[in-house]
Image (cartoon, helix red, strand yellow):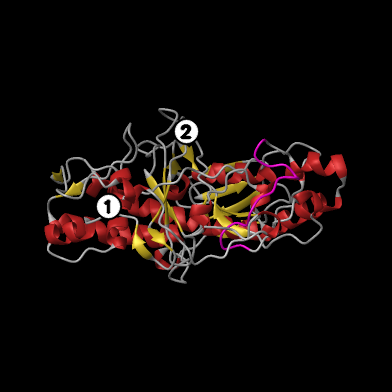
């Protein structure tokens, strides 16, 4: 069957930040870390910076595409923190990043050049590193989806296993030039008797992609009705995973249901637990409900999404480092993020049976090839030329693109 690598030929490896402190669950924390760093002098600044082979305070680096950060060497930095930008830190987790190229070992500028309000990023997910979980309910899909999408630039973080490639839906800014095998859209339109656009293919990928030893595989059906039924489900999956970032409407559970804080969350919760009887999520003595079991049971790569989200916000940091600069109590915005995450996971859980029924190997006859389209040409695996960005080079020099 076709592989995602063939259908969406241009893929980029995950970002490599090099230092944990440039990423945080809220922008205020990043500003506080920046301020602490620029107040430091000499050896203390160097130690807080956490130098690597790729980045030191004296490294000369150009701007990130689309950003307005300084290009002077960080050793001389005295200014304010650049406005943090939202990024996807693993599946369904929006965090914030300081968009300063001087602080990121490998930023993947080619992704920043195409990141805009029209873009959707597809991120491959590895299979689970474990074969089972004692805390999972019977029948729970530990592997989870083979791909997830995000409206935000992903850093490629994987909760478990090997991180997959990041594949933008479009090769140029403004939603121009789909990142699809050349000729795929007209070939599918002819096969299925109706026009097929890039979002229809993406919707089908969300429904049908499955784990395989070689990466995400995407079977294509022979029957047009099966394809368009899957596209309808996939469009709903797409809306839910994008979290309203494109439609302007946040996902909501049907019937007026929504999770609430039923018992105040403690200032610094340390443990997360789920009570299936009351459908309650407990953060120490705090409680949020209703939390459907479908939301609690969502896994990606063998890791429960809610547990991973909580662990990233409560794990201990090394004292004396910038990563240890964090809120002294649980911020209200984290609670809001958690309530939104629960809603998204509940909706994905409700859609899971429909997706599983449609994408099971016995559900349809598969196309084994798309003549004249697959495999894609080598040129489609390279980024497109994007020449409408003005990017300042190191120390204010003009950048040649």
User: Is 136 part of what is drawn in magenta?
Assistant: no
Q: Is residue 286 visible?
A: yes
Contact check, label 1 and label 2, Cβ < 8 Å: no
Task: Report the label total.
Answer: 2
Q: Residue at x 28, y 45 (%)?
A: 6
Q: Residue at x 47, y 43 (%)?
A: 13
Relative to 204, is 393 on the left or the right? right
Relative to 94, is 2 on the left or the right? left
- Can you tell which mark lies on residue 181? 1
Few, some or many residues within 10 Å of mark 1 (<14, 14–19, 20+): many
Q: Is residue 290 visible?
A: no
Few, some or many residues within 10 Å of mark 2 (<14, 14–19, 20+): some
Element type where label 1 sits in the image? loop
**x, y (%) of residue 283?**
63, 47
**x, y (%) of residue 73?**
74, 51
Most foreground residue, 347 or 138 = 347
Mark 1 or 2, which is nearer the eye? 1
For the N terminus, give its image quadrant: top left
**x, y (%) of residue 132?**
42, 29
Work out how far the residue at label 1 is from the one at label 2, CA to CA, in angstroms: 28 Å
Region rendered in magenta:
53-67
Q: Quadrant of residue 350?
A: bottom left
Chief SS of the magenta region: loop
Most foreground residue, 395 or 350 = 395
- Can you tell which mark lies on residue 161? 2
Element type where label 2 sits in the image? loop
**x, y (%) of residue 103?**
67, 48
Q: Quadrant of residue 299?
A: top left
Q: Residue at x 69, y 61 (%)?
A: 82
User: Is 66 part of what is drawn in magenta?
Assistant: yes
State whether residue 240 is above or below residue 93.
below
């Amino acid at each position: 069957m076709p592989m995602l690598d063939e259908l969406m030929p241009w893929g980029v490896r995950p970002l490599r930040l090099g230092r944990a402190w440039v990423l945080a669950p809220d922008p205020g924390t990043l500003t506080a870390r920046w301020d602490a760093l620029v107040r430091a002098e000499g050896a203390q600044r160097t130690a807080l910076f956490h130098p690597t082979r790729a980045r030191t305070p004296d490294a000369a680096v150009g701007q990130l595409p689309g950003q307005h950060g300084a290009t002077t060497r960080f050793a001389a930095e005295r200014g304010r923190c650049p406005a943090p930008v939202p990024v996807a830190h693993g599946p369904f987790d929006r965090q914030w990043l300081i968009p300063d190229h001087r602080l990121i070992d490998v930023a993947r500028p080619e992704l920043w050049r195409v990141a805009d309000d029209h873009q959707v990023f597809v991120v491959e997910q590895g299979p689970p590193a474990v074969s089972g979980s004692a805390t999972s309910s019977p029948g729970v899909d530990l592997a989870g989806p083979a791909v997830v999408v995000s409206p935000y630039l992903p850093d490629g973080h994987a909760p478990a296993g090997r991180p997959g490639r990041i594949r933008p839906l479009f090769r140029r800014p403004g939603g121009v030039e789909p990142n699809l095998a050349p000729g795929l859209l007209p070939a599918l339109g002819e096969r299925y008797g109706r026009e097929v656009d890039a979002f229809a293919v993406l919707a089908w990928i969300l429904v049908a992609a499955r784990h395989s030893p070689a990466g995400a595989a995407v079977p294509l059906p022979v029957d047009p009705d099966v394809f368009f039924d899957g596209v309808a489900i996939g469009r709903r999956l797409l809306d839910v995973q994008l979290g309203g970032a494109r439609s302007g409407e946040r996902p909501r559970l049907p019937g007026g249901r929504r999770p609430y804080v039923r018992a105040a969350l403690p200032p610094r919760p340390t443990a997360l637990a789920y009570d299936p009887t009351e459908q309650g999520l407990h953060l120490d003595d705090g409680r949020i409900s209703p939390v459907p079991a479908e939301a609690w049971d969502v896994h990606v790569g063998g890791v429960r999404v809610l547990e991973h989200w909580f662990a990233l916000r409560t794990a201990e940091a090394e004292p004396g480092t910038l990563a240890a600069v964090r809120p002294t109590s649980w911020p209200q915005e984290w609670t809001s993020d958690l309530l939104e995450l629960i809603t998204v996971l509940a909706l994905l859980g409700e859609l899971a049976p429909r997706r599983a029924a449609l994408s099971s190997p016995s559900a349809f006859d598969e196309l084994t090839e798309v003549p004249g389209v697959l495999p894609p040409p080598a040129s489609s695996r390279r980024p497109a030329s994007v020449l409408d960005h003005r990017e300042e080079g190191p120390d204010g020099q003009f950048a040649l693109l």
